[in-house]
Image: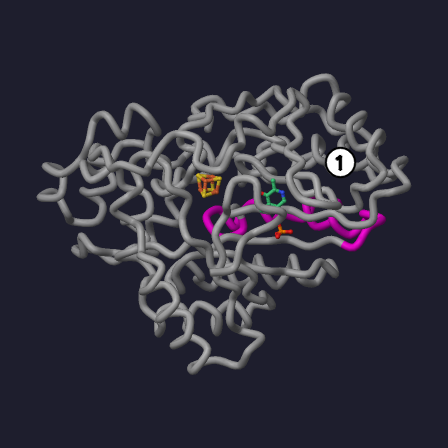
């Protein structure tokens, strides 16, 4: 994934999609985006954890530079080196270990991307890698090894992606992913959805985004207006792993998204030392439901190089999942799945 040191410029607002995007010359979310903490030592100092600096990895930092929005860092506990939010973002020397079975392209994405920005692996659904940028860099993410170019999909006004969708009428759902699709300016997203309106076979639009959680400032009036004017049923799959990620501001942002009529779902990755505890996962489902979000998937992580220390073995994962079922109503229990290259969908464990 692209280390987002150069945030894409906000394009001039254009009337698209039947809506005039209001002028936002100094957008707050852009400022918050740029103001992210990128120096691991600065983060450790803010958290009163100077002693952890000895375990930082320069290699891990060079491969996938740390990036943490300040608001997300504020939700970490000071003085706790095992903080579950800190663990998700800090480049430690655990990542330098080479572990057999943890390779570069764990899910076969390099092969699937045909130059359009589209990944078409599952029936009826196409995933558009809308951008390579993310507001936070999650250490466990398989995209750490894929420097998707900012231009892949958005250049040429999305033409290659639009052509792909127009030529395959079996695709009824378009999934905007990345990177994080909400790292694009709303005007850019409106340009895409404006062009998609002409494709009759498209019935649903889905967004996969971590921004409402890591940078709730992104959920501004312009974004909400865009969502409200879309002609398809919309689902938004957010990505939260631990209940401490959901503070008052995030819950407010989620409620606002819900009020646009979008269906909100959450997917988590099961991570050792972060959320491998049934009570933590149960609390996550509860706080998310309070904010209008239903659980969707609990993923076994993709086995890419550098993430072995986060893995929870399948037996423990199944035991955790059964315990979760005993703690919660069925609709608050996420499906435990993993991604298997070549499978027709996510594979239940
Ligand atoms: C995960 C994924 C999807 C969506 O799968 P669902 O089970 O519908 O959530 C679609 N396309 C690709 C390439 C994916 O990796
Ligand atoms: S998990 Fe999501 S937000 Fe985090 S780096 Fe990966 S794609 Fe970006």
Q: Residue at x 31, y 51 (%)?
A: 311
Answer few, some or many: residues within 10 Å of disc 1's Cα (few below 14, many 20 plus, some between 14 and 19). many
| Total numbered labels placed on residues in the image | 1
Residue 27 image point, x, y percent: 58, 36
Residue 192 image point, x, y percent: 76, 32
- Which color scheme is applied? one colour
The quadrant holding residue 24 is top right
In the rendered structure, which segment of residues is drawn in magenta?
212-233
Q: Residue at x 78, y 50 (%)?
A: 204
Q: From the viewer's perspective, tell me whether residue 39 is left or right of residue 243.
A: left
Q: Is residue 69 magenta?
A: no
Check disc 1 and report the residue beneath it: 190
Q: On screen, 92 above or below 287?
A: above
Foreground pick, 240 / 211: 240
Q: Main secondary structure of the magenta part?
A: helix
Mark 1 lies on a secondary structure that is helix
Is disc 1's CB within 8 Å of ligand 2?
Answer: no
Q: Is residue 229 magenta?
A: yes
Residue 108 image point, x, y percent: 51, 33
Foreground pick, 110 / 61: 110
Foreground pick, 221 / 335: 335
Q: On screen, 259 above or below 3?
A: below
Q: From the viewer's perspective, tell me whether residue 75 is left or right of residue 176.
A: left
């Amino acid at each position: 994934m692209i280390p987002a040191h150069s945030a894409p410029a906000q394009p001039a607002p254009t009337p698209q999609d039947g809506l005039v995007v209001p002028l936002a010359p100094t957008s707050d979310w852009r400022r918050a985006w740029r103001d992210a903490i990128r120096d691991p030592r600065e983060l450790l100092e803010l958290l009163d954890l100077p002693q952890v600096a000895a375990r930082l990895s320069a290699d891990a930092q060079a491969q996938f530079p740390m990036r943490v929005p300040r608001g997300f860092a504020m939700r970490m506990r000071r003085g706790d080196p095992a903080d579950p939010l800190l663990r998700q973002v800090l480049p430690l020397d655990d990542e330098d270990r080479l572990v057999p079975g943890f390779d570069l392209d764990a899910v076969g994405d390099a092969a699937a991307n045909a130059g359009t920005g589209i990944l078409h692996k599952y029936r009826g659904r196409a995933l558009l890698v809308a951008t390579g940028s993310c507001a936070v860099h999650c250490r466990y993410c398989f995209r750490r090894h894929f420097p998707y170019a900012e231009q892949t999909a958005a250049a040429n006004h999305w033409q290659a992606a639009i052509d792909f969708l127009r030529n395959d009428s079996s695709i009824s759902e378009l999934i905007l992913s990345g990177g994080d699709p909400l790292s694009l300016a709303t005007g850019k997203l409106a340009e895409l959805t404006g062009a998609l309106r002409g494709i009759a076979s498209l019935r649903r639009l889905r967004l996969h985004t971590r921004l409402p959680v890591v940078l709730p400032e992104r959920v501004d009036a312009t974004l909400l207006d865009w969502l409200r004017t879309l002609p398809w049923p919309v689902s938004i799959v957010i990505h939260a792993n631990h209940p401490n990620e959901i503070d008052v501001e995030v819950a407010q942002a989620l409620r606002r998204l819900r009020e646009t009529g979008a269906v909100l779902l959450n997917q988590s990755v099961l991570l050792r030392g972060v959320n491998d505890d049934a009570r933590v996962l149960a609390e996550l489902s509860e706080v998310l439901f309070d904010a209008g979000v239903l659980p969707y998937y609990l993923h076994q992580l993709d086995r890419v190089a550098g993430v072995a220390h986060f893995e929870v073995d399948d037996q423990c994962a199944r035991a955790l999942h059964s315990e979760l079922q005993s703690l919660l109503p069925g609709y608050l229990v996420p499906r435990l799945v993993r991604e298997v290259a070549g499978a027709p969908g996510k594979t239940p464990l």
